[in-house]
Amino acid sequence: MATHTKTVSLTDLQQKILSNDLYNDTDNAGVDKWIQEAVDGKINNCWKRFQQEWTTRLMNDETFTDPIPSNQADFVALVTARSDYKNRKQRDDA
């Protein structure tokens, strides 16, 4: 599985504000850890909504007779390969 690296830019002021609440050592590991955990939390919430929505849609689709995958990677691959799947941009553009 590919890894995607994203960059977050903080001003000195923003860094100081975060450092008021987040433990931050000289290499900014505390803020970096918090940012990663925030992204992980967002991904987890998106996954829960994705799984709930698409499990219901697949179960209510009379034309879908295959088993629903029990692991995340296969489930996402199945759903995103469907002709009726649209990502957020596609849904908003429609």
Image (cartoon, rainbow, N blue to C red):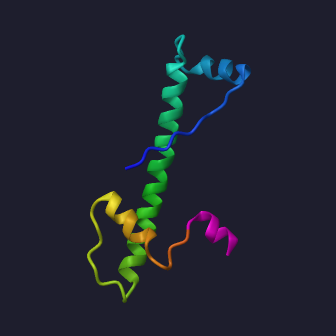
Q: Residue at x 27, y 63 (%)?
A: 70
Q: Residue at x 55, y 24 (%)?
A: 31
Residue 13 occupies quadrant? top right
Q: Position of residue 40 (x, y in %)?
A: 46, 42
Decide whether the magenta segment is chiefly helix, strand or loop.
Answer: helix
Residue 90 occupies quadrant? bottom right
Residue 36 as seen in the image, left or right of residue 59:
right
- Outermost bottom residue: 62
Q: Position of residue 32 (x, y in %)?
A: 52, 26
Q: Which residues are magenta?
A: 87-94
Q: Position of residue 36 (x, y in %)?
A: 49, 34
Q: Position of residue 18 (x, y in %)?
A: 62, 23
In the foreground, 36 or 41: 36
Q: Residue 37, relative to residue 89: is it above or below?
A: above
- Outermost front residue: 2
Q: Residue 40, relative to residue 15: is it above or below?
A: below
In the foreground, 60 or 43: 43
Residue 73 as seen in the image, left or right of residue 80:
left
Q: How many marks?
A: 0
- Outermost top residue: 26
Q: Residue 25, relative to residue 76: is it above or below?
A: above
Q: Is residue 42 magenta?
A: no
Q: Residue at x 52, y 12 (%)?
A: 25
* Quarter containing the C terminus: bottom right
In the foreground, 29 or 7: 7
